[in-house]
Image (spheres, rainbow, N blue to C red):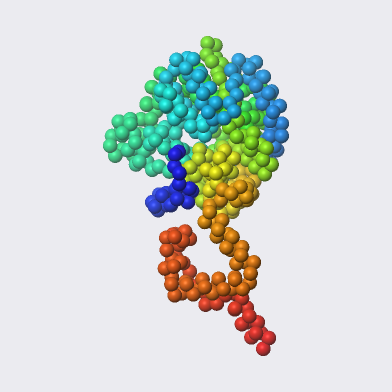
Amino acid sequence: MKETKDHAALAEVFNADEPRVNWHDETLWFIRQKRDKAAHTVADWELLRETASQIKHNVLSNLHDYLLQFEANAKANGIIVHWAADAAEHNRIVHAILQKHKVDRMVKSKSMLTEECHLNEYLEENGIEVIDSDLGERIVQMAKEPPSHIVLPCIHKKKEEIGDLFHEHLGTPAGMADPQVLTEAARQHLRETFLTRRAALTGVNFAVAETGEFVICTNEGNADMGAHLADVHIACMGIEKIIPKREHLGVFLRLLARSATGQPITTYSSHFKKPREGHELHLVLVDNGRSIQLGREDFRNSLKCIRCGACMNTCPVYRRSGGHSYHTAVAGPIGAILAPNLDMKKNADLPFASTLCGSCSNVCPVKIDIHDQLYKWRQVIVKEGYADTKKTLGMKAMTQAFASPATFQLAGKAGRWFMRNVPFAVNNKLNPWYKQREMPAPPKESFGEWYLKNRKKRDE
């Protein structure tokens, strides 16, 4: 996304359509409620969360060894393993594989890593057509938009808008907004794609060091359709997706779908261990800043993330600002602590897009201390000089006011006078607080004045 506006400005664009904001808010909260109900059906839910967190802690503490173990076992299984230091190298590797097989059309199942690396744009610039097979991803691809949610990519769009897109791209009747009809149209469209693409790309949810296999979790089965019908299967994963043993899968599979959508388990949990005879299976292991995040003691736990999206569904800021306001591949609270690691200057606004209420940390299935990391990122960003200039000057002014009782009292009196006598000096578009609120009536006196007056009365 080539948008240069910050989160506040982009959120203001989303907030211009108030009915949509309310609907977006209510829909995501409904999913959060489903998550709670699903969690309450598991007697050992908190033990599961703690177990998953500890497994991931072990992985991050021994990531080098687990990656080498996984690579050795994957190669022994016949998987061709590639290593990519960053997004550019990842894109070049995928492109080289496609060039080797003279492939100019590829089908892709949802992969947030490839969104992070901007793979679609890179391949299209190099003459390769990419069709996203996940329904939500296909919808935003038709709209020439990035996903707004890591699990529900088109949650920001209404069925009527999807109907218009399908009418334009798939030839459905104008005005058709019946979800069943639209889904069938997409199914027929994608069936032809699956049958004619010789290469398929998928993401990876979990990679098992012990066996060299990887697991993909989907609800539509598109990863399976693409991978099984293509001659070449390319799987791309961040290096943090490793888990030590196959028996650990039970812990994460019980947590993932319940946290994401309130389901007991995803419809398809597919294991890939070796290529079929006559076919190729490639796996691209991608760093792209993860090693740097691993070395940041305050932020390394963010690499535990299993991309369930629970923090987004519960976040009061995300629900009312929309995923595109985060101008990064992974939105919401988790995105706001991952993105500054990739580009602190570009994403300096994101850690401030939070109330620090802690709801994200409360629902995280692997117990990432998200709200604490948001707070710590704010401190780092300010110290590095990337904070908004207006906020920095404002905080310095407040520091001086709070440091001097006389200045504080004078500022308070001046503020009350302006609110009473020159209200437009406060109630204007330059005051962000005023944009969505009515300013309160100015108090008649400060707390200090009230206290002194009532203390005198008491003493009398």
- 450 lies above or below 272: below
Query: What x and y, as percent, mark residue 192?
Result: 38, 22
The one nearer the camera, 267 or 88, is 88
Query: What x and y, as percent, mark residue 51?
Result: 69, 38
Q: Is residue 238 left or right of residue 160?
A: right
The one nearer the camera, 307 or 354, is 354
Q: Identify the residue at image location x=39%, y=28%.
A: 187
Quarter occupied by the C terminus: bottom right
- Residue 157 in sight from this viewpoint: yes
- Residue 224 in sight from this viewpoint: no
The one nearer the camera, 21 or 335, is 335
Q: Identify the residue at image location x=54%, y=30%.
A: 87
Quarter occupied by the N terminus: top left
Q: Identify the residue at image location x=67%, y=40%.
A: 296
State the residue lying farthest toward the bottom.
460
Query: What x and y, as percent, mark residue 308?
Result: 56, 39
